[in-house]
Amino acid sequence: MPRAKGGFKTRRRRNKVLKAAKGFRGAKSRLIRNATEAVKRGMRNAFAHRKIRKREFRGLWQTRIGAAARQYGLSYSVLTNRLKQAQISINRKMLSELAIHHPEAFGKVVEIAKGVRV
């Protein structure tokens, strides 16, 4: 049986990996073995970090809301609890955006929350 050399399919597969490794430093962007390892690691990290990004943003929004709520004499946990009691369902991202870009609207939301009987 003749030896199977790297033909069309092999070259296409390798070029796909090298294209994905474009922009990597050194041999990782030029040598197929190094590029394959780097691309696999990059894909694995990309998958994990897409999940982590969601956690980090939620924490950021909570921090922003807490800082804005403290100006009105409430903590984050008290504010969220009172909003829930007042049956105001606004997500953290939007509450954070209100606190940053529309402080007067955020103030009105806080005043509604303050008016709730505990």
Image (cartoon, helix red, strand yellow):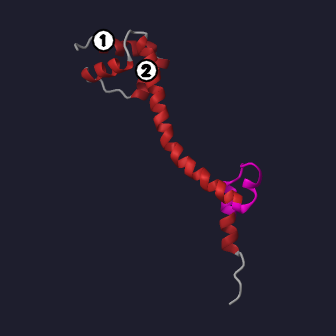
Q: What amino acid is found at the position of numbered circle 2 in the picture? A: Ile
**Crowding at mark 2 (Cα within 10 Å: few <14, some 14-19, many 20+):** many
Q: In this figure, which residue is indicated by the disc labeled 2?
A: 65
Query: Residue 5, how many percent across, how many down?
Result: 72, 79
Q: What span is in magenta?
A: 15-33
User: Which image quarter: residue 80?
Assistant: top left
Q: Is residue 74 left or right of residue 11?
A: left
Secondary structure under tag 2 reads helix
Q: Residue at x 67, y 67 (%)?
A: 12
Q: In this figure, which residue is indicated by the disc labeled 1?
A: 114
Q: What amino acid is found at the position of numbered circle 1 in the picture? A: Lys
Magenta span: predominant SS is helix
Secondary structure under tag 1 reads helix
Query: Residue 7, how many percent across, how many down?
Result: 71, 76
Query: Residue 35, how many percent across, how many down?
Result: 69, 57
Q: Residue furthest left?
A: 117
Looking at the image, is mark 2 or mark 1 earlier in the sequence? 2
Query: Residue 68, how many percent across, how many down?
Result: 44, 15
* Foreground residue among 32 and 105: 32
